[in-house]
Image (spheres, rainbow, N blue to C red):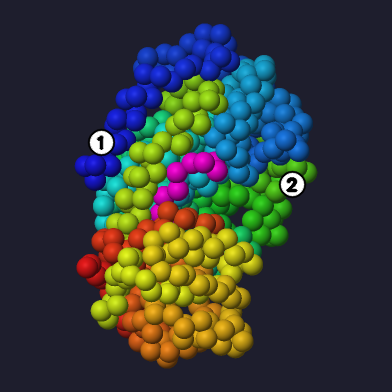
Amino acid sequence: MKKLSTLISTFVLASTLVMPLAATAKSPNDFNYPDPPTEKARKGMVQRIIANMSDKEKIGQLVMPSTHDNSNRMPDERSEKLIKEYNVGSVIVYGNRDAKKTAEYNNQLQEWASETRLHIPLFISADLEYGSVQHVTDGTAFPRQMGIGATRDLKAAKEVAKITAIESKATGFNWNYSPVADVNTNPANPVIGVRSFGERTDLVSQMTVAQVKGYQENGVVATAKHFPGHGDTSVDSHYGLAAVTYDRKTLEEVHLPPFKAAIDAGVDSIMTAHVIIEAIDPELPATLSKKVLTGLLREEMGFKGIIVTDAMSMDAIDKEWGAGEAGVMAINAGADIVMATGTYAQQLETYDALYAALKSGELTKKRVNESLERILMAKYKYDLFNDRYDDPETATKVVNTPAFKEAAAEVARKSITVLKNDGVLPFDASANKTTVVVGPRIYNSTSQMNGVIQAVRTKSSGAVVSAITATNPSDAEIANAVQLASQAERVIVATFSPGELASGQTKLVKALKATGKPVVVLSLGLPYDIKNFPEVDAYLASYAIERWGSPVPTSWNAAVDVIFGAQPGGKLPVNIEGYYNFGDGLTY
């Protein structure tokens, strides 16, 4: 990682010398909010702000709506109303924009906040688990967390977070919902999977700490999620309410340690899981459970930072309790901020229900003020009163840095895990051989496979022919792939599964193997696919794509590099029961 660190340090030094201040920047003194030098003095300042707040302004700080856009992909009048009339203190941003547009977008949100009576800056958040590119189109794409876990390189994990924080901050994000601290002990987990560092508690704990430090040391709030663990579920909480039945000992020994490690490392935010943890509260999901959030997280584990809920529009919460009731339950359970995604009407329902609960006494002023103090202290800690805007032109320069892109490529190459190689790898890039590339549409999209095919064409001197099949290939598609393979010298077949592999993909691999041509299987999703065809000639895991099909070309490009001779560096971060063990991984 010495080369990587040198590249980063050189860029950061240069950027601090040339980065202009945004013309719209205001200081705390402009808003009569001095920036006290000590934590004790800041707490006094925060308490004075709270004393000056109306009940409506207080409730606003507890609500985090998703923003709404106009036809120009800028925040619309609904977003303006949420900030200026409902005084929301934070937002979560979805959608994809380039760096310049993202900075302009987030500056507009902060400008509206500056026009409110108290001028309190916003927390602007996003899911940026694999880099700012998750929402900033020209940002740097890093491997998924399971890929980073495969590197076993804590310095790399921290550098990934550092670069993501630099790019995020440059485009106006000050809060990232990462790292995923879930220990993925269930291979069939439908929602975590490659988003986790792996299935071993110690690996997940160490990687989580490295990334918390990488984000927060570079000015972005880190979030350990999904407390107290979403790694052993078989239900996706976006679509249903999951429950885990393991005992308290398993919870404490397997799933809680990464969160405790994050707390000890000073993590400023923890996100709740919409999962029933039967060992703690057999009736309510963690998001709504006082036993989990106050009893376990606050009192037993000593967390003093911000508790933010996962998206409350997910079916696990919304179908059972609704936006308003669930919001009140979450705050009473110990959450500080309710993530009010969903429709504009649901967001207003959340706000109105919280306000009504405060007025009626269902929510006490003491409970609300505790959350306000945590939120406002964090806004001071991250210097948002003094530095809420970002320069759009500078943002473009920051996220398009060659040093960052090369750093990502280096980490990706170290993540690629070769589990089997019966003498067919690496392919000779200079040989005038025809290569067949076959793989599935992923959630009805061909973009991922087109990316793989293009990467092979870039590396190979010989002809490259390709076929993209259905996710569950038909007999006719399999026959076509076999026909192509019969006329070629070598075969690359990509597979993808967010859980169990489609039977047609298994049948395709076996049919291609039967041609007698060298067959390399590249898994684009979970690494477990090889258990369906252990006799294959060669197999690589790239951990590139999760259950939504989000593309991480950095990872599949690195996998193709490895197929054509780059040195693989990955060690398996999970067990593939009966076939491969945690830590397995070949090199050339």
**Left or right: where 23 falls relative to 16:** right
Residue 6, numbered label? 1
Left or right of residue 258, residue 222 in this image:
right
Q: Amino acid at mark 1?
A: Thr
As drawn, the label of residue 343 is 2
Of pointers 2 and 1, the one earlier in the residue sequence: 1
- Residue 223 sits in quarter: top left
Q: Which element type, helix, strand or loop, lies under badge 1?
A: helix
User: From the viewer's perspective, is the residue at label 2 or at label 1 nearer?
Assistant: 1
Q: Residue at x 66, y 59 (%)?
A: 315
Callout 2: SS: loop
Q: Nearer the viewer, residue 541 or 60?
A: 541
Residues drawn in magenta: 136-144
Report if residue 339 is visible in the image.
no
* Type of secondary structure dominating the magenta stretch: loop
Using the image, determine if residue 51 lies above or below residue 75.
Answer: above
Q: Position of residue 73 (x, y in %)?
A: 69, 37
Residue 137 magenta-drawn? yes
Which residue is depicted at the point 71% across and 53% down?
A: 322
